[in-house]
Image (spheres, rainbow, N blue to C red):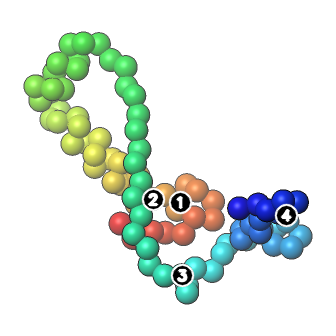
Amino acid sequence: MRGKGEMTKLSHYGKSGEVRMVDVTEKAVTARTAVARGFVKMPAAVVRAVRRLKNPKGNPLEVARIAGIAAAKRTSEWIPLCHPLPL
């Protein structure tokens, strides 16, 4: 937090403003929760098919769940300076 006239120290920046990785070796393990939401617009017939699980390639909601897990496991590959997190 910033106090009056005071800048917060940003841990991922060095004294010259260069970006750097932060050492988290000594950091305590913490439990965290993240929630992601999205919106998909589709015809009513498709929504009905998904709800009835009447799809030629299986349950698309299960496929989406697995894709979300796979994406979360690779977060550190997509976000610069993000440490790999065990899930």
Instruction: Work out how far the residue at label 3 is from the one at label 4, CA to CA, in angstroms.
Output: 25 Å
> What residue is drawn where x is 39% and y is 69%?
31
Residue 80, image x and y in percent? 63, 60
Quarter occupied by residue 41: top left
The residue identified by callout 1 is 77
Instruction: Work out how far the residue at label 4 is from the one at label 1, CA to CA, in angstroms.
Output: 33 Å
Quarter occupied by residue 39: top left
Instruction: Inspect the image, locate mark 1, and give the three-letter code of the amino acid beneath it.
Output: Glu
The residue identified by callout 4 is 6
Q: Is residue 1 left or right of residue 42?
A: right
Which of disc 1 and disc 4 is earlier in sequence?
Answer: 4
Which of disc 4 and disc 3 is earlier in sequence?
Answer: 4
Residue 51, image x and y in percent? 15, 26
Q: Does residue 63 appear in the picture of this structure?
A: yes
Q: Is residue 1 left or right of residue 64?
A: right
Instruction: Inspect the image, locate mark 3, and give the three-letter code of the amino acid beneath it.
Output: Lys
Instruction: Inspect the image, locate mark 2, and give the three-letter code of the amino acid beneath it.
Output: Arg
> What residue is drawn where x is 49% and y is 82%?
28
Can you tell which mark lies on residue 27? 3
The secondary element bearing badge 4 is classed as loop
Which of disc 2 and disc 3 is earlier in sequence?
Answer: 3
Instruction: Inspect the image, locate mark 4, and give the three-letter code of the amino acid beneath it.
Output: Glu
Q: Does residue 19 appear in the picture of this structure?
A: no
The residue identified by callout 2 is 74
Which of disc 3 and disc 1 is earlier in sequence?
Answer: 3
Dot in front, 3 or 2: 3
